[in-house]
Amino acid sequence: MRNILIIGGSKGIGSAVLLQQLETNRVYNISRSAPELTHPNLTHFGLDVLQEELPDLDEIDSLVYCPGSITLKPISNLSIDDFRKDFEINVIGAVKVIQKYLPVLKKGDEPSIVLFSTVAVKLGMPFHASIATAKAGVEGLTKSLGAELASVVRVNAIAPTITDTSLAASILRNDRMKENMIDRHPMKSYLKPQEVAQMVDFLISEKANSISGQIFEMDYGLVTFKI
């Protein structure tokens, strides 16, 4: 049984990752709200990663940082605070957690880190200036940290397309919008949280021991194909 630290495991993709990992591992979750379940292998710490002190942990084999944001506005409507908030949630929070737990993680069993980007970094999309800028920082962090820790800790990121979570509820708020989103993707679907959780499971497993510093697009063909 391995020790998995999840940041933001109470909702969305984080919740799916938590459920997946509880099947075989001990899970520590840090988020403001508690997961909607109890489990003997789950330890929850209720706190705001950006504002509060992180708890001490003795054993960590993998760290998965899930918090994210979707701030979609024209550039003229984006405030400096919008950019700052997105950067803090997506980049500064990840940096704070990594700095805190890296000494413990280095002692772990095949240690690894998984972060989250977005397809909007590679594929230019209107109204995504703030979130794409923040997630580009996540990708830079993934590659730089992967190189720095190459002989000790693997670091990868997943760049999903739109995923059916509460964070994307406004974008998928009715059947017409869901159908439009399906049609927009060449493979005629969009992501479910469980699909992303399966990729996380692979990346933190020994099956991915040769992989670090990579950005994995889960996009149903949105970035790669033009049909």
Image (cartoon, helix red, strand yellow):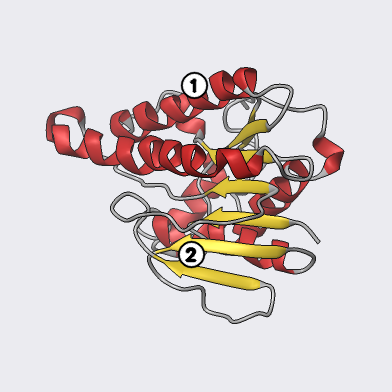
In this view, the residue in front, 217 or 36, is 36
Q: Which of marks 2 and 1 is in front?
A: 1
- Outermost residue toward the right in this view: 207
Image side of residue 176 versus residue 81, left or right: right
Image side of residue 40 versus residue 57, left or right: right
Amino acid type of the residue that numbered disc 2 sits on in the rendered structure: Lys
Amino acid type of the residue that numbered disc 1 sits on in the rendered structure: Gly
Residue at 40% x, 57% y: name it: 167
Secondary element under disc 1, as helix, strand or loop, is helix
Residue at 37% x, 63% y: name it: 47
Query: How many residues crowd around disc 2 within 10 Å: few (fewer than 14), some, or many (20 or more)?
Result: many
| Quarter assignment of residue 147 | top right
Does residue 204 sit above or below 20 in this rendering? above
In this view, the residue in front, 215 or 50, is 50
Position in image of residue 63 (x %, y %)? 61, 47
Residue at 46% x, 73% y: name it: 34
Q: Quadrant of the C terminus?
A: top right
Q: In which quarter of the image is the N terminus?
A: bottom right
Position in image of residue 130 (x %, y %)? 29, 32
Does residue 113 sit above or below 57 in this rendering? above
Does residue 171 sit above or below 203 in this rendering? below
Image side of residue 122 versus residue 110, left or right: left
The answer to whether residue 122 is seen in the rendering is: no
| Quarter assignment of residue 150 | top right
**Residue identifier under label 2:** 11
**Residue identifier under label 1:** 140
Q: Considering only order in the chain, which callout, 1 or 2, is on the residue closer to the N terminus?
A: 2
